[in-house]
Image (spheres, rainbow, N blue to C red):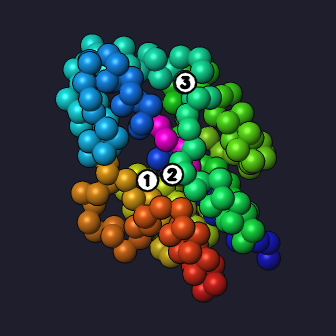
C-alpha cells in the first residue's frame, strides 16, 4: 500500500480568489465590499453585480496575469508542507475558461511547491479518488463524500456558511486542516 492521498482544492482553500475578485468589483463599481460580504458561491449574484459589470470583471479575471498574481492564504504554505509530511498531496482544482488560466495556475502551484505531475484540473472532483478532499464548495464536499464518506472536509468560508448540514466536516483555517487530516489518517 502507498501513502495516503489528500486532494486539495486551490481557490478558497490554498489561495485567495475571492479577495482579488472583490477588489476588481470595488474598482469597477466604486464600492467597498469585503470578501466576507460574499455569502453565496455566486460572487456576482451575492454582491448584486449586474450582468454588464460582471462581464467586465470576468474579462479581467480571464486576462493574463490574474491567476498568476493570486495570493496564498496565511498559513497555507506551512499547512501544505505539514500535509506533505503525512501523505501525498495533490492539487485538484477547477479550471477557469481562459487561455491563460491553466498555464498560470500550473506555474503558481509549482512555485508554491507542488510537482507538475501532482496537479489535476477538473470540475468533476467527485470522480477523484483519495483519502481526504479539502474544498470550499459545499456541493463538491457533499458529492465527493457519497463515495468517500470519511474524508470530505469543508474549508470554512463566508460563501459556504449557509450549509449547516456540513458543520461536522467544516474546518476553520490551516491549523484545523492539518489537525483533522492527521486524525483522519490515524484512523485509516
Q: In the drawing, does residue 160 fall left or right of residue 162?
A: right
Instruction: Tell me if I can see residue 36 in this picture.
Output: yes
Decide which of tag 1 and tag 3 comes sooner along the chain: 3
Mark 1–mark 3 Cα distance, whole angstroms, equals 20 Å
Q: Is residue 12 magenta?
A: no
Q: Picture coordinates of residue 70 (x, y %)? A: 55, 34
Pointer 1: what residue? Answer: 136
Q: Picture coordinates of residue 112 (x, y %)? A: 70, 44
- Which image quadrant is residue 90 in? bottom right
Name the mark on residue 13: 2
**Mark 2 and mark 1 residues within 8 Å of each other at the beta carbon:** yes
On-image quarter of the C terminus: bottom right
Viewer-side residue, 23 vs 40: 23
Q: With respect to residue 25, does 46 lie above or below?
A: below
Q: Picture coordinates of residue 15 (x, y %)? A: 54, 44
Q: Which residues are magenta?
A: 13-17
Neighbourhood count class around disc 3 (C-alpha, 10 Å): few under 14, some 14–19, many 20 upward: some
SS class of the residue under badge 3? loop
Q: Nearer the viewer, mark 1 or mark 3?
A: 3
**Mark 1 and mark 3 residues within 8 Å of each other at the beta carbon:** no
The residue under the point 74% across, 48% down is 114
The residue under the point 39% across, 23% down is 24
SS class of the residue under badge 2? loop
Q: Picture coordinates of residue 158 (x, y %)? A: 31, 51
Amino acid at each position: 500500500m502507498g501513502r495516503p492521498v489528500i486532494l486539495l482544492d486551490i481557490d478558497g482553500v490554498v489561495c485567495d480568489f475571492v479577495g482579488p475578485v472583490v477588489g476588481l468589483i470595488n474598482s469597477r463599481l466604486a464600492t467597498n465590499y469585503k470578501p466576507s460580504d460574499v455569502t453565496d458561491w455566486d460572487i456576482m449574484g451575492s454582491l448584486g453585480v449586474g450582468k454588464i459589470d460582471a462581464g467586465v470583471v470576468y474579462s479581467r479575471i480571464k486576462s493574463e496575469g490574474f491567476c498568476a498574481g493570486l495570493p496564498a492564504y496565511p498559513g497555507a504554505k506551512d499547512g501544505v508542507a505539514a500535509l506533505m509530511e503525512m501523505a501525498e498531496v495533490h492539487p485538484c482544482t477547477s479550471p477557469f475558461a481562459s487561455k491563460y488560466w491553466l498555464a498560470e495556475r500550473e506555474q503558481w502551484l509549482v512555485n508554491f511547491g507542488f510537482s507538475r505531475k501532482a496537479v489535476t484540473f477538473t470540475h468533476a472532483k467527485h470522480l477523484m479518488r483519495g483519502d481526504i478532499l479539502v474544498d470550499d464548495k459545499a456541493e463538491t464536499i457533499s458529492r465527493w463524500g457519497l463515495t468517500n464518506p470519511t474524508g470530505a472536509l469543508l474549508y470554512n468560508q463566508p460563501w459556504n456558511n449557509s450549509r449547516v448540514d456540513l458543520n461536522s466536516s467544516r474546518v476553520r483555517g490551516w491549523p484545523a486542516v492539518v489537525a483533522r487530516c492527521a486524525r483522519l489518517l490515524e484512523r485509516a
